[in-house]
Amino acid sequence: MKILITGSNGFIAKNLIAELRNRQYNDLLLFNRDNNLDDLFDYCNEADFIFHLAGVNRPKEESEFLEGNFGLTSLLLDRLIENQNYCPVLITSSIQAELDNPYGRSKKAGEDLIFDYGKKHDVDTYVYRLPNVFGKWCRPNYNSAVATFCHNIANNLPINVNDPNVIMNLVYIDDVINELINALEGKANKIDKFCEIPTAHKIKLGKIVELIESFKNSRKDRLIPNMSNEFTKKLYSTYLSYLATNDFGYPLEMHVDDRGSFTEFLRTIDRGQVSVNVSKPGITKGEHWHHTKNEKFLVVSGRGVIRFRKIDSDEIIEYFVNEEKFEVIDIPVGYTHNIENLGDKDMITIMWANELFDPNRPDTYYLEV
């Protein structure tokens, strides 16, 4: 199957091309500003399906709107007719096609061309009026507020929020791409004559900025955002894609003493926190118990023993652990416990606690096992 993609250097096209190749659609005819019109003629002869993604949204002159959003669409359809190729055609339009401005009028004109072409030649056509699209590879400081805020905040650049209460209507690039490929495979989400992206998000501009700033701050407070919220998860992924290449890593605060070290790695409001504990050979750590706080220990390097004793009992329970067999040990409440390094090298333990550490209410009581 030969697939023609116009505007192949654009944000949506780059993501589409990557996913098409992931799904083994490898015969792609890519058309962009570097091509000439002869290429378009040849591609329109070969294509079995067309993603017409090319368009103009930030021209130097208003006349370029009509030329890019109407003229190229007209030329594309003329080339198809000349080649007598009536394969399906999909175009991405904009919700601004409903507005009476130069950009909106040019997008509406392109839509009308496609609808008329489909009706006249009995061709399957798909028109997607997209709201604001966000995700990786979107150009900042161009036509996406989300891309601009992610890029600027990630790179310590100023941002400008005119009205934080403006409601943004957003779709995520992966959701867009999945739907476009659904159309290719005959499963478009078509409602009346238009097609729609099934998943959309409405959120205040100020809330978007607040979330992005919290992502930046998470490197210091180690608080991971609520990934059960679909929009937050997608926005966080988008934000990370705008980090400078020399800024992927960040240090953690290690609490070091002669016994080893203890370092908090991740913190969440509702899922507790994860830490890394290093114990030197022969060292025993712990010797305490909790009322409500519970933990999970996983030794990933070295070998040792985790001991338990119910606080009103003399019986000691032992679990021997090592790097050769990963085993999670639950630390129940009401049991004093310790962990001893039995090896000749540092023992590294991943520790999860069900709540964030609160120095004012640590729920930790010293008692030797």
Image: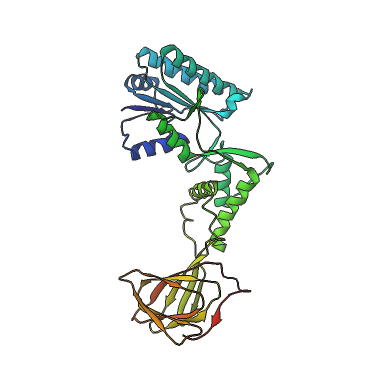
Percent across and percent down for residue 14 are: 42, 37
Residue 24 in the figure: left or right of residue 15: left
Asked if residue 310 lies left or right of residue 304, the reply is right
Q: Tell which of 366 and 285 is nearer to you.
A: 366
Q: Nearer the viewer, residue 159 or 224?
A: 224
Q: Quadrant of the N terminus?
A: top left
The residue lying at 37 percent from left, 30 percent from top is 185
Residue 102 falls in which quadrant of the image? top right
Q: Exactly how many numbered labels are in the figure? A: 0
In this view, the residue farthest toward the front is 313
Specify the farthest residue to the bottom. Answer: 314
Q: Which of 21 and 365 is in front in this view?
A: 365
Colour option used: rainbow
Any part of residue 158 in sight: no
Q: Which residue is at the front of the view, 204 or 186?
A: 186
Q: Which residue is drawn at 45% across and 88% down?
A: 314
Q: Is residue 242 left or right of residue 159?
A: left
Give residue 60's position: percent from left, percent from top: 57, 27
User: Left or right: 331 with respect to 65?
Assistant: left
Counting from the top left corner in percent of width and height, residue 109 is at 54, 19
- Is residue 301 something one can see in this rendering? yes
Q: In this view, does 307 lie above or below 62?
A: below
